Image (cartoon, coloured by chain):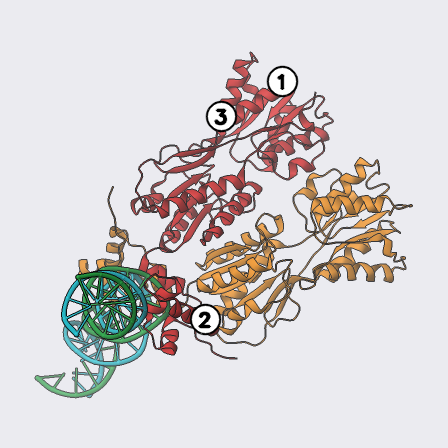
Chain colours: A orange, B red, C green, D cyan
Amino acid sequence: MEENKHVTIYDIAERLNLATSTISRALKDHHTISDKTIKKVKKTAEEMGFVPNTLAAGLRGNKTKTIGVLIPTVTQPFLSSLISGIEITAQKSDYTVIIMQSHDSYEEEVNMAKSLYSNRVSGVICSLAMETRDTAHFHQFSNNNIPLVFVDRVPKDYNTFRVVIDNFTAGYKATKHLIEQGCVRIAHITAGSELGNLYSERKRGYIEALKDHNVEIDEKLIINLNSVTYEDGVKASNALFDLDPIPDGLFAPGDILAVSAVQTAKKRGIKVPEEFKVIGFNNDPISQIIDPNLSTITHPAEKMGKAAAEIIIKNLKSSKNDDAKEITFLNTEVLARESTQK
Amino acid sequence: MEENKHVTIYDIAERLNLATSTISRALKDHHTISDKTIKKVKKTAEEMGFVPNTLAAGLRGNKTKTIGVLIPTVTQPFLSSLISGIEITAQKSDYTVIIMQSHDSYEEEVNMAKSLYSNRVSGVICSLAMETRDTAHFHQFSNNNIPLVFVDRVPKDYNTFRVVIDNFTAGYKATKHLIEQGCVRIAHITAGSELGNLYSERKRGYIEALKDHNVEIDEKLIINLNSVTYEDGVKASNALFDLDPIPDGLFAPGDILAVSAVQTAKKRGIKVPEEFKVIGFNNDPISQIIDPNLSTITHPAEKMGKAAAEIIIKNLKSSKNDDAKEITFLNTEVLARESTQK
DNA sequence: ACAATTATTGCAATCGGTTGCGTAAAAATA
DNA sequence: TATTTTTACGCAACCGATTGCAATAATTGT
């Protein structure tokens, strides 16, 4: 087995009796290099199996064409689609994507932020960990002019780019849909997270829709969770079904919760949608698998990923230090399926 | 806004009147540096907000503590769990993970392999693209002593590490389970991919199980697909249900296919599992959502990711050039749920 | 034919940690 | 006290691509 050393521009330079500066420029079609030389260099580089060393270029230029992604986990459908979107856009502009999972832990998020900084990423896309209450660990990016985009779970008071959906409107739409389908006792499950205020926004939309349509707001129908797992959903659902009378509708701010409600209802002999209508959130794959198919709110994950990546790349190209860090709102829609049919 | 330049060891050295070499060594507890100096340096580094530049270290040492992951997509549950496993293990040893999606395209896979090499990753974990028939683009890693681990969809004839399940045995088990549940006309869906021979292996297991249990092998019951999408599954299922008599069992080598079969059956009024039993593969989340719950074969994605990452890290520590590139087989099990009940 | 451009290429510093080797100072030994 | 051994730290080259500036060669203009 050969101990192939990496081929460098020095090797090419030596072979062709040229300076490394010429090689470097030729490889990127610099206008001061003659066409013949460019062709010759490229051909030789190809023959010798030259692959540029990103590290060297990054060190010298202090930029890496790398986007760091810091998210709670890659296994949630929404987040893996988000990554997919980021990756697709990044690839088009020849950017590399580094992914780190915070597992919803504040401590890990802090560490990984440092690690991304250490890797001198060109930009950062982040969806906050559940635990996170403080965003000081992102100052290192802001302070060094590294574009930072928060997605979905975003801090409220941080002057940087944000790509989100309008959770209030989405919650409003979902609830309104249930009302239109005839529900009058509409339950809601929410979760307490202060920084990423998306659940509270959805709840606000829920409340507002009830008010606007003169539907009674009953605090007993609102269940507050600390996490949004399937098991939590089952508990919440059982609590709702223990009420008398049971609610006739549920707006669950996530498809997993909605599915757990549907399945719990089935187990208890409650018919969905006849006796109990459910609308979820996210349009996860499971929403089309469950019987009855789940009505839900679309959550344009891939689009959000693309938008976030585009913001970073655009911001990197024109390095004008706009202080206008806009917030991008993407649209959501009600997907009316079987679980809310009259 | 301050134009904060990155703090370097030079800055620390200047502040403390020490050499950069001393700083560098102190920061990593080198034994030739006195405890007092180490403490002083670390304290100052902390105060000044020093974050090491990974690029510089990587360039000098020609190693980056980075694992490159090259997979078809991140959105399949199996693959996102695989990533999760890789990431968890990598993080423990302070490795960074770079993820690239080939989207099952050979051309993209070639490009991204080059990109990973360009980033001087320390090791590579790959699950091959469907399209890939040729693995020459991985030689750059093998030739340069960069550990390469193929996972799940692995080439047959490449002397490197592999982490897989025993697809033959898994197929055998799945089929045997159907036989035990009373099926006698067992259908199978397979897909033609030559390099990643996992579907053909599963099929081999299917055939062998039928033989061993004296169940007739009927070529009409075996459907060959080019891809394994939900839509393909519907087509295949319809083809099976157009037969007379229809099969009484199906071993689908993926939960998506299995689910499509269950749903197609329902639409056509065929009762699962009474008239038609189905077993899938992977234990995707949807398998527990669909009604009836899907029997399936476990596919230990996270474990495989961890195993792959461990192989790389271990191999990097002890840089002995073992020519023994072992194949790691992980275990799979039948999960008997409702869709195959007698 | 000579000056003025323009087209090409080379030189050398630079990015920021890392590390082999050398040396001065302190401690141990004779 | 003289000498050997440790201990602690500095010097400077190095990794490989990039880039401002200088320099040489080719081309154009008068």
Q: Residue at x 59, y 47 (%)?
A: A75
Tell me, yes or no, if residue A340 can be seen here: no
**Is D13 on the left or on the right of B54, as rendered?**
left
When the figure is inspected, residue A18 is found, relative to residue B250, above or below; the finding is: below
Other-residue count near label 2 (Cα within 10 Å), few / some / many at <14 / 14–19 / ≥20? few
Residue B86: percent from left, percent from top: 49, 46
Q: Residue at x 69, y 38 (%)?
A: B289
Residue A195 picture location, percent across and down: 67, 64
**Tag 2 secondary structure:** helix
Report the residue marked by disc 2: B43
Q: Residue B330: which disc?
A: none
Tag in front: 1 or 2 = 2
What chain does badge 3 belong to?
Answer: B
CA gap between label 3 and label 1 equals: 18 Å
Who is closer to the viewer here, B63 or A281?
Answer: B63
Amino acid on which the number 2 mark rests in the picture:
Lys
Q: Earlier in the sequence, mark 3 or mark 1?
A: 3
Q: Which residue is mark 3?
A: B168
